[in-house]
Image: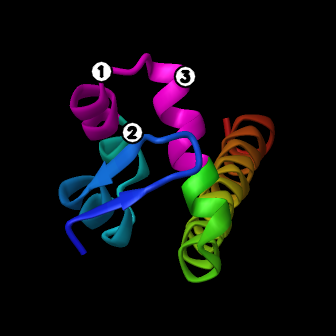
Amino acid sequence: RIVEKMNNDIKLTADVLDALDSGHKIQAIKLLKVSASLGLMESKECIEQYIASQPALKEKFDAQKITINLSQQQFFNILIVVVGLMLAYWLFWR
């Protein structure tokens, strides 16, 4: 799989496809931007279009989004507990 051609005649090179297979969407966008001499938004749209057309790849990136969202939720839960403990200490044990 050297190059994959998309609908709008932009070719995804092996390094772009490897970055996507590794789960590195931003790296793939940067590589496409350079290799195809595109703007950032065009590159992003092309990569997102390609991901949407590949069910296994789409599933992989959707799973990454869920993991990131869970991590953010866990952070806020811990933050709330810490702030609550600090408030309780300030109110009751000063």
Left or right: residue 40 versus residue 68 is left
Q: Is residue 44 magenta?
A: yes
The tag on residue 41 is: 3
Q: Nearer the viewer, mark 2 or mark 1?
A: 1
| Magenta stretch, overall SS | helix
Question: What is the x, y in percent for residue 88?
Answer: 77, 46
* Residue type, label 1: Ser
Disc with the residue nearer the chain's start (3 vs 2): 2
Q: Is residue 27 above or below residue 2?
A: above
Q: Residue at x 33, y 28 (%)?
A: 33
For label 2, the residue is: 29
Q: Secondary structure at mark 1?
A: loop
Q: Is residue 90 magenta?
A: no
Q: Secondary structure at mark 3?
A: helix
Residue found farthest to the top: 39
The quarter of the picture where the N terminus appears is bottom left
Dot 2, crowdedness within 10 Å: few (<14), some or many (≥20)?
many
Question: What is the x, y in percent for residue 39?
Answer: 43, 16
The tag on residue 26 is: none
For label 1, the residue is: 37
Give whichever of 68, 9 is nearer the camera.
9
Q: Which residues are magenta?
A: 30-48
Question: What is the x, y in percent for residue 7?
Answer: 59, 49
The residues tagged by marks 1 and 3 sit, at their Cα atoms, a distance apart of: 12 Å
Q: Is residue 86 above or below residue 77?
A: above
Dot 1, crowdedness within 10 Å: few (<14), some or many (≥20)?
few
* Residue type, label 2: Ile
Dot 3, crowdedness within 10 Å: few (<14), some or many (≥20)?
few
The residues tagged by marks 3 and 2 sit, at their Cα atoms, a distance apart of: 9 Å
The quarter of the picture where the C terminus appears is top right
